[in-house]
Image (tube, helix red, strand yellow):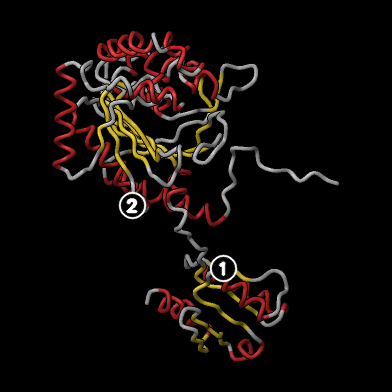
Amino acid sequence: MKKIYSSIRGMSDFDPTKSLAFGEVIEKAKNVLKVFNYKEIILPILEEKDLFIKSVGETTDIVERQMFKIEGKDIVLRPEGTAQVIRYYLQNSLHKSSNFHKFFYTGPMFRGERPQKGRLRQFHHIGAEAIGSNSYYLDAEMIVLALKILDEVGVSKKELKINTLGCDGDKIRFSQYLKESLSSKKSRLCDDCQKRLDRNPLRVLDCKSQQCRKEVIALNLEKEHICGDCQDKFQNLLVLLGDLGIKFTYSPYMVRGLDYYTDTVFEISSDKLGSQDAIGAGGRYNNLIKYLGGPDIPAIGFALGLERIFLTLAEKKLEEKLDVFVATTSQELLGLGINILGQLREEGLSCDLDYCAKSLKGQMRSAQKKGSRIVVILGEEEVANNTLLLKDMDKSIQKTIKKEDLTLEINKIIKA
């Protein structure tokens, strides 16, 4: 028996309906991003491995076990977009042309994870980055922008969680506090977190193990480790979000899974996603540009997961739509039908016909399945009289028209 190949686990095919939904979500997101004056950049899928080691963090799950490496080379499939944007920014010395930039990108990302609901090996991000300002007003804009995109694509129920990690000094103090506080409980932590406690204590807060979560929550974390300036900024941000009518939950245990984050971090979640409940997330990475060899320039960004958005919209199914289906009563008339298709396509109308020699009844069923608004029927009588039969599928009304009036009559129905 011949082998039937299947897609690799964690990699998804997009059927025509899902592709339609994908395109619609991307289009709506891009419209919002352009209203907020973010400029699109298209980035390559392959990058140097060290770019992510230096930016995301050597002890993060992404670097330690999730990157797809090209055999024999220090090149990987990109696991996330922020480091790429900063590489692009520095490579092109954009800080010399302007002190402030706004970018957005879309495209596939890759991580070698154990596939499950909401977690794939290939997934798609819509990301936005703003580079050059440390203003909490910009933090608010980023959050408003992410929520606005989700509103526009139809994600109505969602929760915004927010926290501050403080500056570098705050993160160092916090890491030391975690190490000291959890050292006596080290044996109760999972194997990964026992290693993290020595190498990168903040990563313990990102662990999903119930036992590790229990030990972290018992610490009763608040903002004692955050310096006065960072506390003031965070408080101002929360007040501003309140003034803007943005509901949020303060989440002191949230650190996000990437080392480059400082200051504000946020996550947008949905109860429709199970354990992997984040639709999107982001935050400040004020030191990343400096870490990657550039000047000391602050920045903030976020990414939304397309596949997770689709999971929240599962009940909203998009159907295939076609403006016109051309049906013929015999195969001999197929050539004339194709000429009509060409005429309609020149007018920008989506249209098709049957290439499988179906009966007229079968062609009408095909038109219905394709969601065609109008069917043009071409028969021997119509050819003899230089006419066409036009059927409005929504109203189940049909009429005979002159062949030269076809485009005019179709536009009347579609634009009515």
User: Distance from label 2 to label 1 (Cα)?
Assistant: 29 Å
In the rendered structure, the answer to whether residue 329 lies left or right of residue 28 reads right
Residue at the disc numbered 2: 156
Specify which label sits upstream in the sequence, 2 or 1.
2
Residue 88 visible? The answer is: no
- The percent position of residue 335, horizontal first and vertical second, equals 67, 74
Residue 11 visible? The answer is: yes
Q: Is residue 278 above or below residue 349?
A: above
Q: Is residue 130 above or below residue 367?
A: above
| Residue at the image position 21 percent from the left and 25 percent from the top | 134
The C terminus - image quarter: bottom left
- The percent position of residue 92, horizontal first and vertical second, equals 37, 23
Q: Amino acid at mark 2?
A: Ser
Secondary structure at numbered mark 2:
loop
For residue 163, which quarter of the picture?
A: top left
Secondary structure at numbered mark 1:
loop
Q: Residue furthest right?
A: 1
- The percent position of residue 298, horizontal first and vertical second, equals 26, 22
| Residue at the image position 62 percent from the left and 71 percent from the top | 353
For residue 224, which quarter of the picture?
A: top left
219 and 409: which one is in front?
219
Residue at the disc numbered 1: 370
The answer to the question of whether label 2 and label 1 lie on touching residues, with beta carbons closer than 8 A, is no
